[in-house]
Image (spheres, helix red, strand yellow):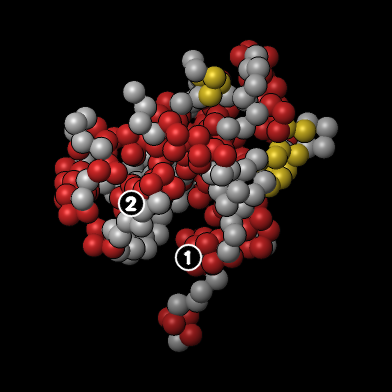
Amino acid sequence: MNRFKDFEQLLTIKRYSSNTINAYVGLLSVFDTFIGENQEIHRLETPFLLQHIRNIISKRSYAYTTQKQLLCALVLYMKEMYGTHLDLDTVRPRKPQRVLPDILSLQEVKKMLDLTENLKHKAMLTTIYALGLRSGELINLKLSHIDKHRDIVTIKAAKGKRDRQLPFPESLKLLLRKYYKQYEPRVYLFEGQKNKYASASLRAVFSGAVKRAGITKEVTLHSLRHAYATHLLESGTDLRLIQELLGHNSIKTTMLYTHVSKRSMLQVKSPLDFL
């Protein structure tokens, strides 16, 4: 029995993104199982609810983002379904110290792609890097979103609920043409056993590529997007244009890449040079 079917339908009607809906409903389902099938979230008094929240965060070692998403899901669920304001400030996480991401070099990205022999896997990783996509954007990318005549790829309802258009590189077009002939996808560019390709499977593809390339940096699938932005900046692409390509609402988010760009660092002279 899905206790959150009505909530899921409500979020769909309110035009929440599919990624947000899946995350919120998924976390609520896990939390519901954690507190026990004989209890219901909306019937718990606040002290008991807070205790269960502390327990699941501790026992499952939730990261900052997961903890924040769980609290947002609970607050929204209680507000929308029961008209109740839930105060969870006592378990709200502090924003973690910003840690600059490890950036994959051009050589490392090339090695990862070169050593990925499975055509479908190579096409997926290449598309993420070539277009600077988030994993969810790749999974939701449909054949109809690709205009091969105008050389444009449209990313629909991306983070921030905005569409954006990206240039379709010729080198990517050649690879995807080869992939299409072999796999013949029907709706989504990359399809799995259940229509869309599974996000967990995509992460496994990336992990395998990292291992084969002998990369020891702490990287995730999102690192390909970081690499895309950093490599564009290092090649001289304007920061405002990179902001548009990435779909960032604020230039401040894009400016992260000025801190990890090799070009920026190489332009700084050491005081030793002044002697």
Which residue is identified by label 1? 259
Residue wearing tag 2:
71
Answer whether residue 120 is visible to the viewer in this image: no
Residue contact at pointers 2 and 1, CB within 8 angstroms: no
Q: Residue at x 24, y 58 (%)?
A: 91
Q: Is residue 75 left or right of residue 175?
A: left
Amino acid tagged 2 = Leu
Instruction: Please name which of the two marks, 2 or 1, marks the residue nearer to the observer.
Output: 2
Please tell me the numbered disc located at residue 245: none
Q: Earlier in the sequence, mark 2 or mark 1?
A: 2
**Residue in the picture at 65% in, 40% down:** 156
Residue 4 falls left or right of residue 196: left
* Outermost residue toward the bottom in this view: 275
Quadrant in which the N terminus is drawn: top left
Residue 95 % position (x, y): 34, 63
The residue positioned 59% from the left and 57% from the top of the image is: 248
In the image: residue 17, left or right of residue 239: left
| Label 1 crowd (10 A; few <14 / some 14-19 / many >=20) | few
Give the residue type at disc 1: His
Can you see residue 86? yes
| Residue 158 on image: x %, y % | 59, 45
Figure check: 13 above or below 228: above
- Vertical relation: 181 (above or below) 19: above
Secondary structure of residue under mark 1 = helix
* Quarter of the figure with residue 47: bottom left
User: Percent from the top left, x then y, of residue 24?
Assistant: 40, 41
Q: Mark 2, residues whose alpha carbon is within 10 Å: few (<14), some, or many (≥20)?
A: many
